[in-house]
Amino acid sequence: MADLVAVAFDDPADAFALRAELAKLQKDYLIDMEDAVVVTHEEGGKVRLHQPVNLTAAGALGGTMWGALVGLIFLNPLLGAVVGAGAGAVSGWLTDIGVDDARMKEMGEALPEGGAALFVLVRKFTGDKLLERLEAWREKGRVIQTSLSEEQEQRLRALVEKAEESRIAPPAA
């Protein structure tokens, strides 16, 4: 079972940088992530999700390849590629893996304008080594949601949040 961790930042650059660092740590086998999405609350109130993989584009690319292959069989690879790309794009657009998009948008609306949050779905991690490598993000954010154990959550809060914020109770879910 995966654990959800959501950390809010005042600066979206911090959220993107942390996601990039977590990707590096995944290559070092310190964390195994199922999904990592940055949510930004832009000026004017618009909430955007920045997925690591564009499923619509990936579906269109795969559909183009399979459509062209099927089109070759029926002696019209161009038509097959076009139909396949359309079908693949629609299937990619309808696919939702990882953290629920509607929930992330809802929580993103609660962020201050110009702020961001990183939502990470973690399968497993090496606690001590991971926290040690994330020292650069000390006191830069605040934990807004987690499904970690109480002890793990307190250790994460101690790293990420400023001392006065860590005493504040987390918002009700």
Image (spheres, rainbow, N blue to C red):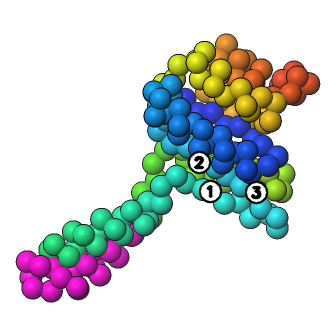
Q: Amino acid at mark 2?
A: Val
Tell me the residue at 60%/56% (across/down).
50
Q: Main secondary structure of the magenta part?
A: helix
**Number of the label disc, if any, that sits on residue 37:** 2
Q: 55 or 14, which lies in front?
A: 14
**Marks 1 and 2 in Cβ contact (< 8 Å):** yes
Numbered tag placed on residue 49 in the rendering: 1
Q: Name the residue that disc number 3 marks.
A: 41
Is any part of residue 172 visible from this angle? no
Give left or right: position of 9 versus 68.
right
**Is 129 contained in the magenta span?**
no
- Residue found at x 73% / y 45%: 14
Which type of secondary structure does the marked residue at label 1 adopt?
A: strand
**Residue 61 is drawn in which quadrant?**
bottom left
Amino acid type shown at disc 1: Leu
Residue 105 sits above or below residue 35 on the image: below
Q: Which mark is residue 18?
A: none
What's the distance in space between the residues labelled 3 and 1, CA to CA?
A: 9 Å
**Residues in magenta?**
71-91
Residue 34 image offset from top left, x and y in percent? 47, 38
1 or 2: tag closer to the N-terminus: 2
**Residue count near mark 1 (Cα–Cα under 10 Å), binned few <14, some 14–19, many ≥20:** some
The answer to whether the residues at label 3 and label 1 have Cβ atoms under 8 Å apart is no
Disc 1 from disc 2: Cα separation: 7 Å
Element assignment for label 3: strand
Percent across and percent down for residue 17 are 66, 45
Whether 13 is drawn above or below 131: the answer is below
Residue located 35% across and 76% down the image: 86
Whether residue 58 is visible to the viewer of this picture, yes or no, is: yes
